[in-house]
Image (cartoon, rainbow, N blue to C red):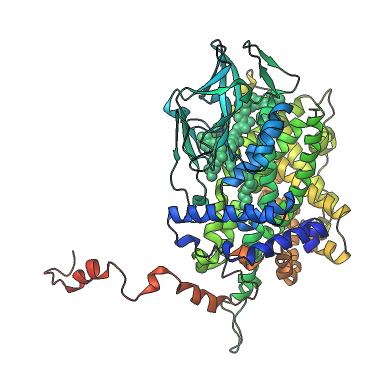
Amino acid sequence: MKVAWAGSREAFQVSDRMAKLVANDPVFEKFSKPMLGRKELFKNTLRKAAYAWKLINDLRLTEEEAKWLRHYIDEPNYTDLHWEMFVPAIEGQGTKEQKKKWLPLAQTMQIIGTYAQTELGHGSNVQGLETTATFDRQTDEFVMHSPTLTSSKWWPGGMAKVATHAIVYARLIIDGLFHGVHGFIVQLRSLEDHSPLPGLTLGDIGMKFGHGTYNTMDNGVLRFDHVRIPRNQMLMRVSQVTKEGKYAQSDVPRQLLYGTMVSVRQTIVADASKALSRAVCIATRYSVVRRQFGSRNGGPETQVIDYKTQQSRLFPLLASAYAFRFVGEWLKSLYIDVKQRLEANDFSTLPETHACTAGLKALTTAATADGIEECRKLCGGHGYLISSGLPELFAFYVPACSYEGENVVMMLQVARFLVKTVSNLGYKQPVGTAAYLGRVTPLLQNNCAVQTAEDWLNPDAILEAFEARAARMVIGCGERLAMFENPEEGFAELSIDLVEASLAHCQLITVSVFIQKLNHEIPGNGVKRSLEVLCYVYALFLLHKHQGDFLATGYLTPKQASLANEQLRTLYSKVRPNAIAFVDSFNHMDHYLCSVLGRYDGNVYPKLYEAAWKDPLNDSDIVDGIQQYVQPILKQKLHYAKL
Ligand SMILES: CCCCCCCC/C=C\CCCCCCC/C=C/C(=O)SCCNC(=O)CCNC(=O)[C@H](O)C(C)(C)COP(=O)(O)OP(=O)(O)OC[C@H]1O[C@@H](n2cnc3c(N)ncnc32)[C@H](O)[C@@H]1OP(=O)(O)O
Ligand SMILES: Cc1cc2nc3c(=O)[nH]c(=O)nc-3n(C[C@H](O)[C@H](O)[C@H](O)COP(=O)(O)OP(=O)(O)OC[C@H]3O[C@@H](n4cnc5c(N)ncnc54)[C@H](O)[C@@H]3O)c2cc1C
């Protein structure tokens, strides 16, 4: 199962080696992080990042190994933006000459970059950005300027204190004409003494949610006061500006300007299963250790994992972690394929890839963030302790619902893709993830054939149910949209339904990828049978949660919906004996989990007790402030008993 989770034996070995490297090195200790102040916390992160870079070079780690190393260090920092956004932006949007100049500098970290798109006034609406890049023909330069307060760049990670360079998105202006938003490589700091270059105002935007998690990142603010950069620092794969000031667009579609976001959204989907599996591992192990009620004749109480209600909250999350792992793997292969096509100037699959990355990013991050919080509740009161590992994991993860495309905004992008697909149905056969929309007639006409709970243990029945629900919701939206004279007005009016239809479409993708995975790639019958159980749990849990959709579209009868729920209960009993094995298969080490409740050895209570004594408040019996503020209250003799 560890191999099935990792994707291959080799993938397992690489990640396992890197997990151990990090866990066994005292530099990467992280348990004390929540006790540090912001400055200490930040310096500590800089120290770890520098040491990691040294390890990467000394040990000659491959790109894959380096990624795992950074992952297990488990602290967001400036290198995330450098490797995941700055470098890919140059790779995807730079010309050959630009790549030749900038990539070697970035890949050896002689320069450190960030991705400066969002502003104080605009994040989602990229076309609304206000920073200007005005071409000056006399000097062959662009003048970068922040004309308003709301045009201040706001959020870019690593920008406040570390990055030497940024890809800055700004409105291109030539001779007073606006030519859309483009990316520019801008140097921010001196490579000699790290001071901000003239004309730039740079700073940190302040503390973020949670203490020891995202505050290791220096998210920054940046303002330009007429800062000049050479013309050849505009990323020019998509559009070019000549020294005469002529604006030209190559036959590469404009959407490629958004390519870095497609790349990172894909990574975010691939990473969702890491965060969810981490929370599920903690909650499952603790649910086996924790006992409440049910003691008979002085025997042990019931392990909380044996309560059906606990199972009904925990096991769907376990199944979701596996579903997200597989859909992440699948999306990565879709992305690699589109990347190769784009390099060969084949842009045909870009719209579908954009819809998949946007929609699955929204689906997986929302479910993961909610899932981590549910795992915290599944651990009862102790889940609220920092030492459970869950509050910090939640604080770290939850911004994924907003960054890289706010989730609802992303679902609306999926909706645009679906509406377009439906409106083209007469003359363009949908393919890939939308192929089912080419079979609307049977999907709209045939209803579910399930008659017993057993009938739900059938991948074809499940797939058809999810296809019929999504098709009926998408087609329904299409029909209602057609009644509006102005399509944009209609889209806005129906946006709630469109987001729900998009979610149905994305859930269909996750369910069908899970089923495909079982059909083709699982080594070993035991592993395959166990994963089949999780696949059914995932699908039937979604069906139960969204049964309103399945009923309202008329595909299911109430009886069939209740048979699905009955089957789900039976499936939970099948998951229970393997629950610990399922979570051990994630191969998460104690160092990575950083949780007393999720310890591999289950030695929870003595370690919880021990961890409590490490709190700085327990350094002495009488702490600072008691004499000054508590003793006087105790000693005063007030006339009235109550204030
Ligand atoms: C403990 C365990 C691990 C935890 C893991 C945590 C996760 C970490 C994972 C990975 C590490 C990565 C490190 C990164 C850390 C995060 C840092 C965050 C960075 C950022 O947030 S950067 C800023 C991101 N900003 C956005 O995403 C903005 C969102 N807005 C947009 O994308 C767009 O503006 C828009 C799509 C909403 C609208 O675009 P626009 O106004 O231009 O107009 P449209 O008319 O709608 O679109 C035009 C046209 O283009 C198509 N389109 C849009 N986007 C794309 C795209 N990306 N690719 C291809 N095509 C695109 C759109 O569909 C339209 O097409 P049609 O004209 O309809 O054909
Ligand atoms: C931790 C973190 C790190 C970040 N790192 C970076 C970075 O490195 N570089 C960078 O450039 N940016 C970064 N960002 C910024 C991030 O990309 C934006 O915050 C994100 O894209 C969301 O945009 P917004 O803040 O403008 O949200 P808004 O769009 O203002 O969202 C507010 C609300 O409005 C709703 N809404 C907006 N538009 C619509 C619409 N059309 N229809 C319906 N509802 C709508 C949303 O659903 C949401 O509920 C980061 C953000 C965070 C939280």
Q: Answer yes or no: is residue 469 visible.
A: yes
Q: Nearer the viewer, residue 145 or 390?
A: 145
Q: Tell me where residue 40 appears, x and y as whole percent.
A: 45, 56
Residue drawn where x is 42% and y is 56% of the image: 37
**Extreme-left residue of the structure:** 639
| Quarter holding ligand 2 | top right
Q: Tell me where residue 567 appears, x and y as whole percent.
A: 76, 61
Residue drawn where x is 52% and y is 43% of the image: 162
Q: Is residue 73 above or below residue 141?
A: below
Q: Nearer the viewer, residue 381 or 144?
A: 144
Q: Is residue 550 above or below residue 573?
A: above
Quarter of the image with the C terminus in it? bottom left
Q: Tell me where residue 387 appears, x and y as whole percent.
A: 52, 67
Q: Answer yes or no: is residue 503 visible.
A: no
Q: Tell me where residue 267 appears, x and y as whole percent.
A: 69, 45
Left/right of residue 68 with respect to residue 378 in the rendered view: right
- How many dots with numbers? 0
Q: Quadrant of residue 481?
A: top right
Residue drawn where x is 50% and y is 76% of the image: 610
**Extreme-front residue of the structure:** 192
Q: Is residue 588 above or below residue 557?
A: below
Q: Quadrant of residue 597?
A: bottom right
Q: Nearer the viewer, residue 613 or 407?
A: 613
Left/right of residue 561 with respect to residue 289 in the rendered view: right
Residue drawn where x is 70% and y is 31% of the image: 99
Left/right of residue 515 with respect to residue 604 in the rendered view: right
Quarter of the image with the N terminus in it? bottom right
